[in-house]
Structure formats: C-alpha cells, structure tokens
Amino acid sequence: MVDRVNALLPQGGGAPRLVDIAGRAAVSEATVSRVLNGRPGVADTTRGRVLAALDVLGGQRPAGARRGGAGLIGLVTPELTNPVFPAFAQAIEQVLAGHGHTPVLCTQLPGGATEDELVEQLVDRDVSGIVFLSGLHADTSADPARYAALTARGVPYVLINGYNERVSAPFVSADDHAAVGMAVAHLAELGHRRIGLATGPQRYVPSRRKREGFLDAAVGMLGLAWAEAEELVRCTLYGVEGGQVAADALLGLGCTGIVCGSDLMALGAVRAARERGLRVPYDLSVVGYDDSLLIAFTDPPLTTVRQPIRAMAAAAVGALLEEIGGSPVQRTEYVFQPELVVRGSTTTHRRTTRTTARTARTTRAARTTG
C-alpha cells in the first residue's frame, strides 16, 4: 500500500484497533496481538508490516519495538500525471514491502506543498529514510544545501534520476546520454537523416544529458556540424503539449524522425504530425522515452527507450536500507543502461524506400536488356 502524508494522522483521535492494523498489514488480528505483545512465532517481514501499519495509523509502538529497523520510508515524487512516476512508486513500494517497510507517498502538486515542506512533514513523523524521485536535486537552479541540512539531521536518503555533484549521497540514474544515442542510431538505420530532439527544460540534469547525447550522436552518426545539430534541438515543457510544440517546430525544419524526452512528449509529437496531415510512422517516425504503462497500446504503438525501473528501484531501496542500517554506501551515481523497444511508430524513411525500389527496378531493367 502507498499512503499519502495526510493518511498518517489518526482519524479518530484514539489508538487504532486491532482489526484496522490487521487489515492494513494483511494479517490476522491474532498476529497483530502477538507482535504488539512481543511474542515469538512471527516472521520478521510480517512483524515489520504490522509495525509499519501501526505507524501509518498513528499508533504508539510497544516499548520493545521502537524503530526496530522497519518503519516508514518517505517517497517524494513530482506530480503523477506522467505514468513513469507511478510506475517508479509501485516498484519502490514492492521492494520496501519485502523488507517490512511502508512508503509514504508525497506528491508535489501545482500550488501544493513544496519539496521542503513535504520533507518537514516526513521528518516530523520520524521516517526511517527518504527516496527522492526526480526532485530538486535534478534542477541545477535549485540550492543543494537543503540536502546537506537533511544529512546533518541524521536522515538517510537516496536520489533517483538527476545526479548533482554538489550533493553527497547515493544516486541512481538511467543513462540518458546512451538512451538518446540508441534512439538516433535506430532512426539512422532506418534511413532518416533529418532527425530532431524534443526534450524538457535544460535546467534539469536528465534533459541536459539527453541533449548532449543527441548532439554527440548527430555529429558522430549523421555527420552534422555541431551548430547544425544544435538547431535540431527543441527544449519545452515535459508533457503532451510541450512535445507537440517542439515537434511542430522540428517538422518545420524538415525532420522525418523525432526523438522525445518522454513518452508523453512523443504522444504530442504524434498529435503535431496528424494536425499537419502527416502519418506516423510513414511520414514521421517518433521515438519516446520511459516505456510507460499502456504505451504499447497507443496508435501506433510507440517505439521507446525503456528505463529499467524495477532494477533502479531495487538499487535505490538497497542503498537506502544500507544507510539506515548504519553501513553507508558510496556517495556516487549508479547508472543503469536503458533498452530500445521497437514498435509501430518508427519505420524506414519513405525516400529511402522509394530510392531502393527505383534501384531494384533499374537493376531488373538492365538485366532484361542485357
């Protein structure tokens, strides 16, 4: 289960009932009673789930079970309209549950609580640690001192996607540079030579890395000059609307293939093409990023670069639990390789197809006359 911060507050003002704790921990009331009374015969993971459920319901732990290693873990995420963030949250929750921990999901909504305010709520609740997903650590314009302050307060944490060399903590990231290189290579193999990149604001580390990966690929694989490659990059807001705006500009520059910084941006690129009367993939090939839920069922099914979400979640939780257990892990970035997933939104460039057909006809005609 994934609970929001407001779910931490006891609803009735009194101690939670055994039936409520049992329901939340998915165990029997007898098991809850054994845990609360310190009796043997309960597996460590089950005991951890019961104590975590007690924490969530606002109950007081028994004297012998004060923070026995299993408890609440804060999970701070951006808004959940991008399907990749719920996917990460679910994967992290599953790994934490296996270790007897319960995640407290804190979502940054427009006009809602800030990351700093959410962290204060989590610290006040005495969470064992915090996982930050694509937070302010990924924003190069944000002050990283907030993380040093969290370290000084003795709160372990790990950060996903958005390495910041000014923050001394374990980082887990997908290789954005390599991801875009894979996408460009795929389009180049299909005969596309005019390829553009639609990605997010450059103050975010993942966007910067995608841009760098694109420029290196455009120069190295397509033979473009650096300045010419830069003209084929459009940085807008992440999301469908941002992808549509960026793709419209790139189509105006004659691009036949577009690499996008997210799957939502890729859907925006498909929309931009259709508004121009173009067909995807026959007139425009589109590559997304993330491999979000249901992307395989879009029209057309989206070719994308898949983030290894489960592996990244396991690594992040593993590093955090090591920190919580008093065994600090290396303050560095653990980088995971993405995977290109080819579906229906990319195909051979039409001009290449026509040229190949003409060549074949010419060859057959020469053989006939010969």
Image: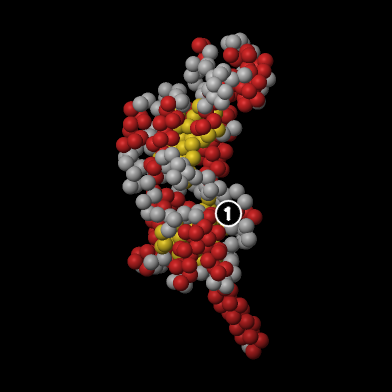
Q: Position of residue 126 (x, y in %)?
A: 45, 24
User: Judging from the image, what secondary structure is the residue with disc 1 in?
Assistant: strand
Q: Which residue is mark 1?
A: 341
Residue at image x 55%, y 69%?
275
- Residue 116 shows up from this direction: yes
Q: Quadrant of residue 12?
A: top right
Furthest residue in direction front, as rendered: 12
- Residue 113 drawn above or below residue 306: above
- Residue 195 shows up from this direction: no
In the rendered structure, the answer to whether residue 234 lies left or right of residue 269 reads left
Location of the N terminus (image quadrant): top right
Residue at image x 63%, y 61%?
299
Q: Position of residue 240 (x, y in %)?
A: 52, 57
Q: Position of residue 187 (x, y in %)?
A: 52, 63
Question: What's the image's color scheme?
Answer: secondary structure
Q: Quadrant of residue 53?
A: top right
- Residue 216 drawn above or below residue 110: below
Residue at image x 50%, y 11%?
63
Of residues 328 and 353, the one drawn nearer to the viewer in this rendering: 328
Residue at image x 41%, y 59%?
235
Of residues 75 and 164, the one drawn nearer to the viewer in this rendering: 75
Q: Quadrant of residue 121?
A: top left
Inspect the image, locate mark 1, and give the three-letter code of the amino acid beneath it: Val
**Total residue callouts:** 1
- Tell me if mark 1 has few (under 14), some (14-19) or many (20+) residues whose alpha carbon lies within 10 angstroms of its own: some
Of residues 218 and 151, the one drawn nearer to the viewer in this rendering: 151
Q: Position of residue 191 (x, y in %)?
A: 52, 69
Location of the C terminus (image quadrant): bottom right
- Residue 358 drawn above or below residue 325: below
